[in-house]
Image (cartoon, rainbow, N blue to C red):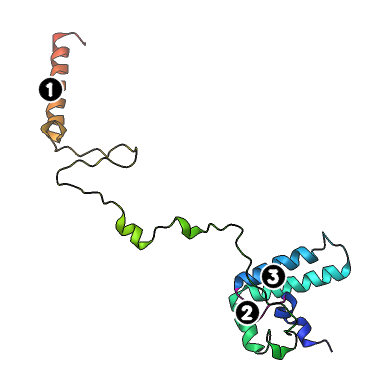
Amino acid sequence: MANPTAQDPYAILGLPRDASPLQVARAHRRLAKRFHPDLHPGEEVAARMQQVNEAWALLSSTLRRSEYDSSHPTAGTPLSGHWAASRRPIRPAQPTTTRTWATWRATAAETRAAPRTVRRPGEVQIPPTRRPQPLEASPPTFRDSAWAALILAVLFLTLLAAAVVAGKLG
């Protein structure tokens, strides 16, 4: 019978049970580079890579990981036999740069100290973009009404009839 701890995904990836998803992903990437069959030919390497991928498939999904943890309560702990004191705990890698995403964000004190734009009543605001201003709807006039179109049509028909009677269009 196979050793049950040999198939423990935490043991395969070398992680403690409380490893974060980031630690799981980094352990998988590290082992994938180490045991990739294209980079390191051999049947043992391919078998190890298959184990690494199966462990990754189990631990990368929060649902599958919680199901595994509930059905294997001692997995990834010293009680399971694989997490000995000789193993180094996996620590998150240090950032490659000291500048992080939060350095450009303003703190609350900086936001409060920022100069304010005072808007005075009746002052025309210049838009911040170069988009054209929307057209304002003008109030309707008589020329825009249906009565104006009807009068114009009657006038045109009257002129047309007068031209026919005069013999110019006949």
Label located before the other in sequence (3 or 2): 3
Q: Is residue 7 left or right of residue 24?
A: right
**Number of other residues with Cα within 10 Å of mark 2, as a class: few under 14, some 14 to 19, many 20 or more:** some
**Tag 3 residue:** 27
Percent position (x, y) of residue 145? 14, 35
- Which quarter of the figure has residue 104? bottom left
Contact (Cβ within 8 Å) of mark 1 with mark 3:
no
Q: Mark 1 belongs to which amino acid? A: Leu
Q: Secondary structure at mark 3?
A: helix
Residue 58 among magenta residues: no
Q: Is residue 60 above or below residue 153?
A: below
Instruction: Using the numbered discs, state the Cα–Cα distance from disc 1 to disc 3 in whole angstroms.
Output: 88 Å
Residue at the (70%, 88%) spot, across then down: 78
Where residue 7 sits: x, y (%)?
76, 81
Tell me the residue that label 2 is attached to. Answer: 65
Residue drawn 16% across the image and 30% down it:
149
| Viewer-side label of 3, 2 | 3
Residue 131 position (above or below residue 36): above
Disc 1 versus disc 2: nearer the observer: 2
Disc 1 is placed on an element classified as helix
- Please state, as top left, top right, bottom left or bottom right, where the N terminus lies in the image: bottom right
Question: Is disc 1 surrounded by few (<14), some (14 to 19) or many (20+) residues within 10 Å?
Answer: few
Using the image, tell me which numbered label, if any, was put on residue 42: none
Q: Position of residue 142 (x, y in %)?
A: 11, 33
Amino acid marked by disc 3 = Ala
Give whichever of discs 1 and 2 has the lower sequence position: 2
Query: In 3D space, how far apart are the residues under numbered discs 3 and 2 (Cα atoms)?
Result: 16 Å
Residue topped by disc 1: 155
Picture quarter with the C terminus: top left
Q: Quadrant of residue 75?
A: bottom right
Q: Which residues are magenta?
A: 14-20
Q: Is residue 18 magenta?
A: yes
